[in-house]
Structure formats: C-alpha cells, structure tokens
Image: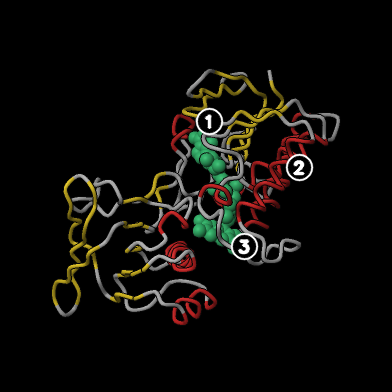
Amino acid sequence: MYDLIIVGAGPGGLAAALDAHYLKLRTLVIEADKAGGALSQSYPWKGVDSFLGFHKKKGGEISDVIVRHVMDSGAEIKENECVLEITKGSHFSVKTSKGIYDSRTVIVATGIRGTPRKLGVPGEDLTGVSYSVSDPSEMKGRNVLVVGGGDSAADCALGLEEAGANVWMAHRKDELRATDENRESISRSSVKMLWSHEVVNFTGKDKLSGAVLSGKEGKKKLSIDNAVICIGSLPSTSCLEKLGITAEGSSVKVDENCMTSVEGLFAAGDMISSLKRIPQALATGEKAVYAAYKMIKNPYWK
Ligand SMILES: Cc1cc2nc3c(=O)[nH]c(=O)nc-3n(C[C@H](O)[C@H](O)[C@H](O)COP(=O)(O)OP(=O)(O)OC[C@H]3O[C@@H](n4cnc5c(N)ncnc54)[C@H](O)[C@@H]3O)c2cc1C
C-alpha cells in the first residue's frame, strides 16, 4: 500500500514527487511515456521562456535536469506504464497497462495534451502526417506544412525553420492566437503563412506527398514531405471517468488545496491551471502533495 501514487511525470508530477520524498511519503510515480512531460515529449528542441533560472535552456535540457533531480532524491518512477483506470473503495486502486497498485491518496498530473485532436480529413493516416515533432533536425531540407494557429503550432513552425526545413503554416483564421513574441518571431521568420486556409485532404500513396487546402481564393495544392497538425488535444482525464470526474473545457475542478470532488484524489499542473506554464505546474504539484500529506497525517495535523 503506497501513501501516494502520482500519475504523470511532467513538471507537475515531478514537483509533487520531490516533495513527497522530502515528506517521507511512500510514493510511486507512474508515467505513460518518458519522464519529463511536455518538455521532453513535445518541445525538447525549443528554448523555454519565463522559467526562472533556466534562461535560454531547451525543453530537453530542462527535462533532463528536473528528472535527474527527482530520481537522485530516490523517487520510484515507473516509465512506459499507462494508468488506465482509478477506482476507490476503502483506498484507491490504480490500474495500469502492467498491473494494479493500491494507495491511500492519488495526485493526477496528466497534463492536457492527452490525445491530439485530429483534423478528420482524408489522407490524415498517411505516413508523414504527425501531431508533434521530436527531432526537427530530421526535417532539414524538407517541405513541411504546420497546421494550427496557437503557440504550439508557432513553436513547431519556428523550431522546424531553425532546423532548416521549408515551412508553411496554415491557419483557419487571419491572425495567430499566440504570444506577441511568437507572432513577431513568425513574422520575422521565413515561415510562409497561409491565412484563412483549411486542409481539405492530404494526398500520397502510403506516404504523404501533398496537401489540398481551401482558402478565400479557392483551392491550393502544396507539395509536402511532412505535415504536423498542432490544433490542440482532448483532455487526458479518461483514467478518472470511473470516479465520475470529467474535464470542463481543458480543466478539472479542484478546491483551494488541489483536491477534486473525490476525497483523497488531487490534481495538479496544466489540468487544473488556467495559466498553463511550467511554474504553475510546479506550484500546484507542490500544493497537492502538502494537502495529501496533511490528509494522511490526520488527525495529527488537525
Ligand atoms: C509546444 C509547447 C511549448 C511550451 N513552452 C513553454 C515555455 O516556454 N514556458 C513555460 O513555462 N511553459 C511552456 N509550455 C507549457 C508547459 O510545458 C506545461 O505547462 C507543463 O509541461 C505542464 O506540466 P504538467 O506536469 O501539468 O503536464 P505535462 O508536462 O503535459 O506532463 C503530463 C505527463 O503525464 C503523462 N500521462 C498522461 N496521461 C497518462 C496516463 N494515463 N498514465 C500515466 N501517465 C500519463 C504524460 O505522458 C506526461 O508525461 C509549453 C507547452 C507546449 C506544448
């Protein structure tokens, strides 16, 4: 029986894991992918902004530092193990792709990337169409279409451009929904904007070779080697469904101690924050673990 199981090893889950160790809670961290969260999975190549102390460091570098810090503290992290279902009786039962674990409390910090949103157009399953880029340098010299108009799409387009790809960015609106810095970077870059354009279909035989887009002036064909679709994702709250917890928009409702409507089940990071940034994820992870600690140590702390 663990005192605490943390689901997700992004900044939110890792911050909770570090403090849980400090508080001597018997803790297990379960991560579906590789520890590090969005930093290592979505933007290892991108320079991270607004994270005090990590000026001009890349997502992958920061991820290495924070994962090492938590691992060196002695935390137990199981990677490549997906939490499928959480149920509650006298305690929590956490069912994963590899087993079942019992715990007195749970912190869920599964982020919001969950399942990438799809365009739902013909040809989207062709090889060459993806929803993230792990190594932009692999696309050097290639023709790449980035679809989307938010910060993820802008970061992706800029990362690819910097790596030497020939980049188009198609957005269904006529302005980006991104930070001023990203808007300015895009306008200074060689990224070719296709404003008010939507993808009608992708073309190719097994492998992607083109895209057909529709815009105000009619249809347009592009010859491309890759397409990266960055139009958001569905919330990663499926493991909470049996507990009756669903996302409202992209957020799960919690009280001021990060506790959900289920006693002993806490949430942290992007899935509860209106401002989805690394510092918020760290802060809420920490807050949740102190609340879990207080609950476990009851009535001592009353
Ligand atoms: C492209 C991009 C650029 C960004 N740039 C910046 C920036 O410059 N500065 C900044 O402050 N913020 C930035 N952010 C936001 C920042 O990365 C997030 O706020 C932060 O990572 C949130 O941490 P988290 O722990 O809540 O979620 P995540 O980092 O998303 O981690 C969630 C973890 O949970 C795991 N998981 C999900 N479902 C399960 C499951 N069922 N079982 C087990 N594990 C599961 C995932 O694999 C993942 O590792 C950026 C985000 C993106 C996408």
Q: Earlier in the sequence, mark 3 or mark 1?
A: 3
Q: Is mark 1 within 8 Å of ligand 1?
A: no
Counting other residues with Cα less than 10 Å from the Cα at mark 1, is it few (<14), some (14-19), or many (20 or more)? some
Instruction: Name the residue that disc number 1 marks.
Output: 80
Residue under the point 45% across and 78% down: 189
**Which is more toward the observer, 278 or 239?**
278
Q: According to the image, label 3 marks what residue?
A: 48
Query: Which numbered disc covers residue 69?
Result: 2
Q: Residue at x 55, y 50 (%)?
A: 38
Q: Is residue 246 visible?
A: yes
Q: Nearer the viewer, residue 298 or 285?
A: 285
- Position of 161 compared to 256: left or right? left
Specify the quadrant that holds the N terminus: top right
Give, as a three-letter code, the residue at label 3. Answer: Val
State whether residue 86 is above or below residue 219.
Answer: above
* Amino acid at pointer 1: Asn
**What is the distance, in whole Å, between disc 3 and disc 2 at their CAs?**
19 Å
Q: Is residue 123 above or below residue 23?
A: below
Residue at x 76%, y 29% (from the top left corner): 296
Element type at mark 2? helix
Q: Quadrant of residue 164?
A: bottom left
Above or below, 78 against 136 in this view is: above
- Residue 275 appearing in the image: no
Question: 12 or 144: nearer the eye?
Answer: 144
